[in-house]
Amino acid sequence: MERIVHDLRLSETVTPFGVGAIVDILGESLIAADTSWWDRKYAPEISCDRLLARLGPGILRQAPAHAGRAAKETAHLLYWRFPAWRFCERCTQLSQITGKHKGRWINRCECGGGLVPMRYVATCEKGSHIQDIPWFKWAHRGNGADITDAVRFCRAYKELRFVRSSRRGEGLASLSVHCTGCKRSRPLSELTSTDSLHRDGIRCDGIQPWQEPKSGMICEHRLNAVQRGATGNYIADRLSALDIPEEISHSAEIADKVRSHVYFEKVVTDNGGPQAEMVAGWIADELGTTAADVLALASGAEDTEETPLLDLKDGEWSAFVNKLDGGRDHSNGNFVVDGFSIPTEATWPSTLTSRLVGVGQVRRVREVRALRRFQRHNADAEYVMVDLGLDSKRKPIYPAIELFGEGIFLRFDEAEISAWEETPEVRKRAEILLKSRNSTPWAHRLPVPEPRFVALHTISHLLIRRLAFASGYSSASLQERIYAHSDRPDRTAGIFIYTAAGDAQGTLGGLVRLGHPEKLVPLLLAALGDADVCSNDPVCIESDHQGSSHLNLSACHGCTLVSETSCETGNRLLDRQLVLGGGTVPGLLDHLLDEVRSTVGR
C-alpha cells in the first residue's frame, strides 16, 4: 500500500480526522496512521502538565504543519489509502491497482477513468479492527445454485467489475460485483446480512490497515460489513484541559489538615471503634468539617477511582472561583479572569439574582486537546491506543493541539440549587433521563443526568443560541464546559462558554465584552424568553423522550439544540422543563419570566 500526502487543517488531526479515522479528500479515501509514524523532528511538543497528569506517562505532540504551498521537503503527516479496493467510474473494473503517470502515483485507471473507493469495508465486532473486504473472494462465495467448480476455482483476478443495473430494482440489489471470467455475479444485498462475512469464510486480520501482518496475530471476533463513512467506524476518546494554575480544592485542603492533625493517628488506630468516633468529633469541630468525613479519611474510603475529565474540572472550578473573588485581574499569562458578583438588590429579577451569584469575563484562556484512544463498531469494543509503536508502553505520543480563546463564566448559588434538586418532582423528571442513559449501551460515556447538570446544560445551550447573534461568533464557534456535579468533594454549579482557535481568531473580544453583568443579564433573560415557546410546542414541551436513544426531554432543534461540536454531550441530556418549569415540575428559574413581564407591565 503506497503512502500518499494531502493537506488538512491542524485541528482536524485531533478530531474528527485523528489517528484511525477515515478521511475523504478530493475523491480519495485515506486513513490516519498512529503517532509512531510521525516525524518527531517536525512534531513540536506541547506543554500541559495538568493534562499529562491525567493521561499518564507520555508526550503531547502537535502534528507537523506548514504554511503556504507544500514541497517535497515539507514536513507532513502520513495517511494510508483505505480502502485499497476501488472501481473505475468509466470501465467499472474493480481492483487494488493504482495508476502511475511519469513516475507518480495517480488515482486513475488504465483507461483514464477516475478510481472511486468501494463504499463498504469490514469492521471487527469487538477488537476495533478495520480492513478491506476481499471482493474477489466474496464474489466467488455464497450458497447459491450457481456456485460451480468453475466459480470456486476461478483465477480471473483482473476481471472483476462493479456493476449497477436498474433492472434489479433499487438499493443494494441493483449493485453487484461481477466476474467476467466465470460469469459469476453477486449483489451487495447479500453483504449486509448478519454474519454474512463469517459464512463466507472471511476472517478478521487483527490489525489496522497501516500495520504489517504479524504471524500468530489472530482475532477471534467476527467481521461486519459497514459503509465506509458510518459513524460507528470511528469513536474517538478525546480529553481536553484548560491551562490554569492548579488550585487545591477546599475539600482537599480540609483533608490535608485532617491528616496532619495530632489526633488523626488515634482515629486510624481505633479503626471505627467508639474512641475513633469521639476523637473524630473533636477533629471535626476544630477544623469545621463533619465526623463522618474524618472517619472516611481514616478508613481510606476517599481513595475512589476518578474519571480524568471530572478530576480536571475540579481543579478548573477552584481556579474560576478564586478568580471571581479577586475582582479585576491584573495578572499576565494564559488565564485572565475579571470577576463580578451579582448584587441581590439590583433591578434585575430576584428569581435570577438569588441563583446567579457570580460572573467572570475570561479575557484569555489556553486549552489543550489531546486524543487518547479510539474504538470502532460500538462502545463495547476494545480501545485502540493512538501510539502502536515499540515505545508506546513506556512513553506514548498523544496527538494534541493548543488553542487560545476568551469566554464567559457563570456561577450559580449552591444552596439554592441543592434545595431545588431535592424536590421530588424534579428528581422524578431527571430519573427519566437516567433510565434512558442506563439502558443505552454507549451512554455510559455521558455524565450522570442529575437535575443540576440537565438544568445548567440547557441554560448553556439557550445562552449560546442568543450569544451567536450578539458576539460576532457563530454558534458553531462557541463551546461549553459544564461544572454541575453534586457527588464531587466540592459541589460545582457553573457554566463556561468560550471560543478557542489555533490562532488569533479566538481572541477578538466579541464574546468577552458581553461577560459584564450589565450586558450578560439582559442576554440571559432574552435567551430564556426565546425558550419559553418552541415552534414545536405543545409536542416539545410535553415530551419526555426526544433525541437519539431518548436522551432528551423537552428539547429540540426549534428551541434548545446547537451544533454538536459546541456541546459536551453531543446535544443530549437537555430539558426546558427543568429550567422554566412545566406541568407539576418546578424549574430552576421557575416564574422568572412572569416576574420580568410583570415588571415591564408596570
Image (cartoon, grey):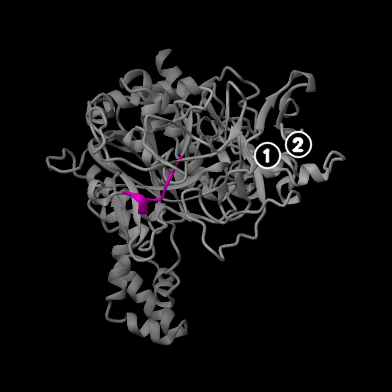
Which residue occupies the foreground of this view, 387 or 153? 153
Q: Residue at x 51, y 51 (%)?
A: 208
Toward the bottom, the furthest residue is 269
> What is the tally of numbered marks visible in this picture?
2
- Residue 517 lies, in percent from the top left, at 28, 29
Q: Is residue 417 left or right of residue 56?
A: right
Find out whether residue 32 is within the magenta segment: yes
Residue at the far right in the pictured view: 145
Task: Residue type at mark 1: give it.
Answer: Ala
Residue 496 in picture, x, y percent from top left = 35, 38
The residue shown at (68%, 39%) is: 156
Q: Can you see residue 420?
A: no
Q: Which residues are magenta?
A: 31-38
Number of other residues with Cα within 10 Å of mark 1, as a class: few under 14, some 14 to 19, many 20 or more: few
What number is the disc on residue 182? 2
78 with respect to 220 (left or right): left
Hey, which residue is sitting farthest top in the picture? 601
Q: Are marks 1 and 2 in contact (CB under 8 Å)?
A: yes
- The residue closer to the viewer here, 374 or 304, is 374
Q: Nearer the viewer, residue 494 or 235?
A: 235
Q: Is residue 84 above or below residue 370?
A: above
Measuring from the top left, give residue 535's x and y in whole percent: 57, 17
Q: Amino acid at mark 2?
A: Cys
Q: Name which residue lies at 23% across and 28% down.
A: 68
Asked if the magenta segment contains residue 529, the reply would be: no
Q: CA distance from mark 1 to mark 2?
A: 8 Å
Which residue lies under the disc numbered 1?
156
